[in-house]
Image (cartoon, rainbow, N blue to C red):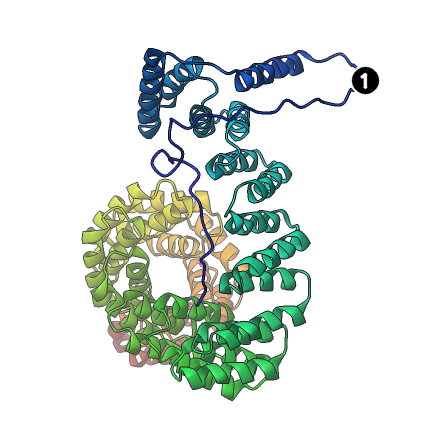
Amino acid sequence: MSRFGIVSVLLLGLLVAGPTYAQQAKPAAATSAPEKKPRKLTRKERKELARRAALDAAAQQKRTLSEKDREISEAYFVDGVRFVLLEDYNKALERLLKAYALNPTNAAVNYKIAETNLLSGNLQDATNFAQAAVKLDPQNAYYYLLLAQVHTSQKQYDQAAQVYTTLIKQVPNSGYYLFNLADLYMAQGKLNEALATFNQAEKEFGPLDEVSFKKQQIYLKQNNLDKALQEGEALIASNPDQVRYVLAQAQMYAANNRFPDAIRVAQQALKQDPDNPRARMILADVYRQQNNQPESEKQIKLAFESPALDIDDKVRILIDYIKQLPNPALNQTAQDLAAITTRVHPREAKAFSIAGDIQTVTGNRAAARANYQKAIRLDNSRYQIWQQVVLIDAELNQVDSLLTHTEQALELFPNQAPLWFYNGVGHQLKKQPARAIKSLEYGRKLATDNPELLAQFDTQLGDSYHELKDYAKSDAAYEAALTFDANNAQALNNYSYYLSLRGEKLDKAKEMAGKLVKQFPDNDTYLDTYGWVLYRLKDYTGARQQLEKALKTSADGTVIEHYGDVLFQLGETDKALAQWQRAQKTGGASPLIDRKIKDKKLYE
């Protein structure tokens, strides 16, 4: 155990622990400055010299206070301190300066004025009064500490270091401020000076664990790995029961590619603490860098089995895996680690959430949704998890789940436009266009700052209004979607197809469908739409070409029926009948298919 802890000294608010008001200054010896060649001073320099001269004169002045003046000065001082505590620095300075006017040679008054100026941001006056306090009472450590802080606040690190050096020399029993000085050197990057100061502290106080850690940092910054490792071994030797020192040493070996040593020391830690997850993580990382994947996976899974490895640490590790997924070499390991996390932390929503993310990235949608739902049961306040559930419902085309989950989520997040969008899509898929329009129109009002989402709303509204045969609103919605994105595939396809069904604006429909097929020449749905638009324009040969391309990849009954209609118009009645029969058998054809087959005649 350390005999001393590193002392952290509070520099402010030291009325109780610090000097008392009654402390008086000792006479300061006058010093003579060497002569310098005179030069013309700036106005700012003259003003500063005048200020310093006034302070020096006050410091040199021996003044005998009457009892009444002393009482008044003390009253001003106490009142000023009270306002400092209330953080009313203007009133505090007003009282303290009145105390100073009566008794300028009182070190405590100068100290408190310096502190108040520091707190209020007046660093120049803080410097002057702190220097005066030190001069008036050079044996009070608090005054030096305040002056060092003032210099540090102005990034005057050399001056601050000099103040600490003087403090250590002048004030008895102040060797523990060596630690402050060493830290200041470290902050400046003066590593040699910091190291020398730490060594001086160790000579005075003996070996200290905290100092050894800081010396290690210095040695590492100096690329002196051997010295850093020596400090680590010394720590282990002097603290044989402290596994944290063993782990730090193992980590240092691993970070510097000393893998055999890292493994040896990490295994030493496991002998002391067999379930230590940090030792397992070090081993897992070392084995990974040695391309020993089986042993690396074994160690990281053992680490994840430990409840001592914090859930947030596990989540961070799993996020690193997600960045590398999907990857056949890592997919199973990531899934196994996620499963361990949910088993070890069954009450943590974030465990199931990250497991859902990993299942999503690796393509296990149903498993992902199950994990997200468990996360929601533990904590339903995270919108992103609800959004993932809804997206998976839509991707799996599970309409009932989509409606259920969007309605549950909307009770918690009624201002989230995407939830209204998917709720509208769900009603649309359930052939409930009126309810779909209600949700879509409401959600559209919430999406005005998101033009891309707004276009998706307009596209779905175009479909829903078409179902209600409100063609004017349907066309307007499609036009709005295409205004934002002229290449919106769903809008181009559905708008052109519905126009062809109505026999309206066929030239416009042909232009849109042709544009879409040019972008996606192998998409059977778009080829069918284009073919059907050509059919309505009585371009039966062109329609046949497009539909035959579509049928290379499609077995949809609607496409097959369309092809039969084209063949009938081209006079190939027997072939048309065969396609109608095929469409009837496949399913998805129009209600007219039975009459077409029975009468061997085209009905539209």
Q: Residue furthest bottom?
A: 294
Foreground: 14 or 595? 14
- Residue 35 makes an appearance in the image: yes
In the rendered view of the protein, which quadrant contains the N terminus? bottom left
Residue linked to disc 1: 37
Tell whether 222 sits left or right of 497: right
Residue 5's x, y, as percent? 44, 57
Callout 1: few (<14), some (14-19), or many (20+) C-alpha neighbours within 10 Å? few
Residue 522's x, y, as percent? 52, 69
Foreground: 456 or 478? 456
Tell whether 230 sits left or right of 576: right
Q: Residue furthest right?
A: 37
Residue 244's x, y, as percent? 45, 72
In the rendered view of the protein, which quadrant contains the C terminus? bottom left
Residue depicted at x 50% and y 30%: 137
Q: Which amino acid does label 1 sit on?
A: Lys
Task: Establish if 127 lies above or below 268.
Answer: above
Q: How many marks?
A: 1
Give the quadrant of residue 53: top right
Residue depicted at x 32% and y 79%: 586
Task: Establish if 486 lies above or below 534.
Answer: above
Foreground: 569 or 487? 487
Tell whether 555 sits left or right of 600: right
Residue depicted at x 56% and y 60%: 202
The secondary element bearing badge 1 is classed as loop
Residue 502's x, y, as percent? 33, 53
- Residue 290 makes an appearance in the image: no
Residue depicted at x 32% and y 69%: 351
